[in-house]
Amino acid sequence: LPAECISHIISLVTPQDACRLLVVCPISKSVADSDSMWENFLPSDCKQIISNLVPDSSLITSLSRKYLYFHLCHNPINHLT
């Protein structure tokens, strides 16, 4: 399948299932690690939320979306709501 199709399929599952897919289907690794796929799992206002927490916005743009997703999972920011 083309990368676009794989990316679309992965975007329909949970982040946990996307990670499981890496183990089962190594061909999808580049797609499952791509920022465009992980962008689907982040809230639409993620950049704005994080920029309120981190004064250096260049740091935010340099992080992979996958890293950012898992970082937010392990370091929730619920105290801001």
Image (cartoon, helix red, strand yellow):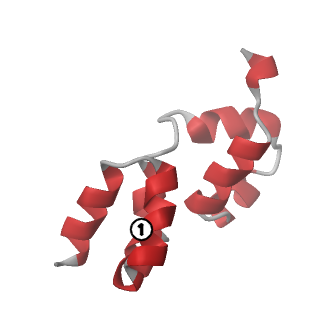
Name the residue tied to disc 1: 21
Residue that extends furthest to the top in the rendered view of this protein: 81
Q: Secondary structure at mark 1?
A: helix
In which quadrant is the C terminus drawn?
top right
Mark 1: give few (<14), some (14-19) or many (20+) Cα within 10 Å.
some
Kind of residue at disc 1:
Leu
Q: Is residue 46 left or right of residue 9?
A: right
Q: How many marks?
A: 1
Q: Is residue 18 above or below residue 4?
A: above
Q: Is residue 53 left or right of residue 50?
A: right
Q: Relative to the observer, which residue lies in front, 14 or 59? A: 14
Q: Is residue 54 left or right of residue 70?
A: right
Give coordinates of residue 6: x percent, y percent. Answer: 25, 68
Q: In the image shown, does 64 or 17 lie closer to the viewer?
A: 17
- Report which quarter residue 65 is drawn in: bottom right
- For image coordinates 41% across by 68% down, the residue present is 21
